[in-house]
Amino acid sequence: MSSDSEIKIKAGIRPGAQSGLKTRTIKVDYLARVEGEGSLYIRTKGQEIEEVQFKIFEPPRYFEALLRGRDLTEACDITSRICGICPIAYQMSAVQAMESALGIELTNEICELRRLIFCGEWIESHTLHVYMLHAPDFLGFEDAITMAKKYPKVVSQGLQLKKIGNDLMKLVGGREIHPINVKVGGFYKLPDPSQLRKMLEPLKQARDIAAETVRFVANLEFPDFERDYEFVSFFHPKEYPINSGRIISNRGLDIEVPSYLDHFQELHVARSNALHSVLKERGEYLVGPLARYFHNEARLPENVRECARDINFEVKDCRNPFKSIIVRSLEILFACEESLRIIEAYSARGPAFVNYEVKAGIGHGCTEAPRGLLYHRYEIGSDGKIKEAKIIPPTSQNQKTIESDLFEVVRHYFSSSENELRHRCEQTVRNYDPCISCATHFLKIEREDANP
Amino acid sequence: MRKKSSQARNNRAKIKPKLAVWKFASCDGCQLSLLDCEDELLGIAEIIEIANFAEASRHVLPGPYDLSLVEGSITTSHDADRIKDVRNQSRHLVTIGACATSGGVQALRNYAREEEYRKYVYAQPDYISALATSTPISNHVKVDFELQGCPINKTQLLEVISAFLHGRKPNINSYSECVDCKLDGNVCVMVAHGTPCLGPITHAGCGSICPRFNRGCYGCYGPQDSSNPRALGDWMVSMKRASPDFVSRSLQTYYTGNKTFHEASEDFQKNREKAEALGETESLVGRDTDREDTNRKDT
């Protein structure tokens, strides 16, 4: 895990090979509408792209280092402070890692409640991205607030949807940012079933808004752009995966969570605060909604699949990263549906948590954060204190893929105006909803032209 | 007459106050609190010009700004320079959250060797440049108001924005968490269940959620205005409610950059070492974590 990162992609042209070319520079010094700080630098010479750098300059906070010596019960709340947008993903990966180290068996009720609060986070995080960070790109607005002037109903519905996700997190977790109810072994307190039932009506409204969202985003204009990605996500035979599954890819990867580090490694790129995660065998890969949908579409509830059929969205469309906004919207619809199912069946039988004995061990935890797989590994001593910690967030796993996308986008829009090219590049980064606070990573386009 | 007032209104509408939101080392959670004001956001945008808020908009207006909200702590020399620039462009500067007001959980590096931390996380530590400490904004520039919390309370954030735009003092209670907890009618978790709780020394504002969920307050809103962590810690240890180590760790988390919390934390660490050396294990009895909780029927 880290923070300032700079990537370079060489395009096989020696600097200075073509003398007499003029340099033109396009700068975006602060990439907007992403979580955190990043920039982009692209240099072209004549018809060749010489260099692409996506830079993350989020200052490092050294979470893995400061976790050492803390009690195993503390990792959940401390790591949630890595990201205010997806704290539940951090809490869940952390408690699962501890539970695997200690051999704790959870009750079905606890597992379902954890899935429920995670659905709240998917609704809140995806809706924030779809309406406030991503849609303005497609419609040519600077932000959701100016977008609201032309699309008042759409934006206010989006805000309502986001609020319902937050309300759900609040009800189960105590608050929407850094919830306080998750602990190793379960929860501090089970939510009251009658209180949760009060969410049924709002969630039914949320389901309607989510279905409208899918129809709305399906009508946006998408660039004709596809890449052959290696999609990496959880696979689960019975459900659309959030908290558990095997890690698979469309190129033959099929592993259990504990073998994660045998197949993936983090590289530290020069002059960089973010580590890149790559597959040891094949390099870059993609995590997140596109990968999850690609592998698990068949396990979505029937009405979500029907909604996808209505807009003619197919699994192969996941190869167009700009269409991630459609998949996010379908996942919001799924999360509403799933929340309704869990609440309907919930009876607070208890217990709120499972008691356990402390022992030394190594634990791995992995969950599907809204942005993709989030892996934690801890080594615990016999006194319950953390000896070693490793955290691999989704954005550092997507970073190489984001750069390759940028490379292709620059090639694709080579003859466009600088403004359009810059905007397309920004949008390409935003396709991934990068959480730069997590990955610890901006847009400067420099072109060299043959025109005197 | 009526015409005149509508004209005055129009004039006011033309010069909306300018708000800027800045990020330093943080998790984005506190600025997200503003986007989490779903019911109020569009209304806020009617009366305030959101002039610079990178997380929400590409639209950037140049300063000066009437109000700057600052999230995050200072951890790099670049940021130490940037905050001075932010201050120069801001009529009022308000810091939001534990990172900006106290250095955040990343201030744990202040008591360790930053170089060792860097080596642990990064394969190429030379690529990383960071300061040895994580410090609050007030260590670097004049701050007009500090809003505590990890994360901040969004209702309080709206109150602070409103207060500064109307030129009044924000109405934020600085008393202890216990006051709100009792007003909410919660059963005291320390008295009723023996659960260690930092409520008495912690700043109110979260809505006393932890006790409502059968959990002791873990101090994420930082110290209240007359905090005495030593007294609370001594009491919890003597009543066997908590081990010295537990007290020490609790004080050394989200507000570890706070002097009062940190000095008390070190005292309890010394007490533990002294008792261990003398073999007085009796004084070390007490909960060490929330692991010793039992499943109560009321959950």
Image: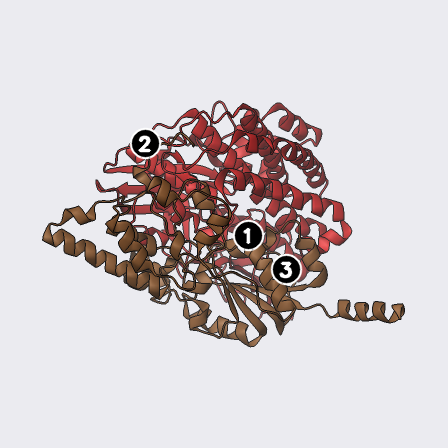
Chain colours: A red, B brown
- Residue B277 locus on image (x, y percent): 11, 54
Circle number at residue B58 = 3
- Does B246 sit above or below residue A29? above
Percent coordinates x, y for residue A130 in the rendering = 63, 45
Same chain, marks 1 and 2? yes
Give the residue type that dot 1 points to.
Phe
Q: Chain of mark 2?
A: A
Measuring from the top left, give residue B46's x and y in whole percent: 72, 59
Q: Residue B257's quadrant in the figure? A: bottom left
Q: CA distance from mark 3 to mark 1?
A: 22 Å
What is the three-letter code of the residue carrying label 2?
Answer: Asn
Q: Is residue B298 visible to the viewer in this orientation of the structure?
A: yes
Label 2 sits on residue: A355
Question: Residue B106 occupies which quadrant of the picture?
Answer: bottom left
Give, as a three-letter code, the residue at label 3: Arg
* Residue A180 in view here: no
- How crowded is the residue under tag 3: few (<14 C-alpha within 10 Å), some, or many (20+)? many
- Quadrant of image for the C terminus of chain A: bottom right
Mark 2 surroundings: few (<14), some (14-19) or many (≥20) residues within 10 A: some
Q: Which residue is mark 1?
A: A407
> Dot 3 lies on which element?
loop
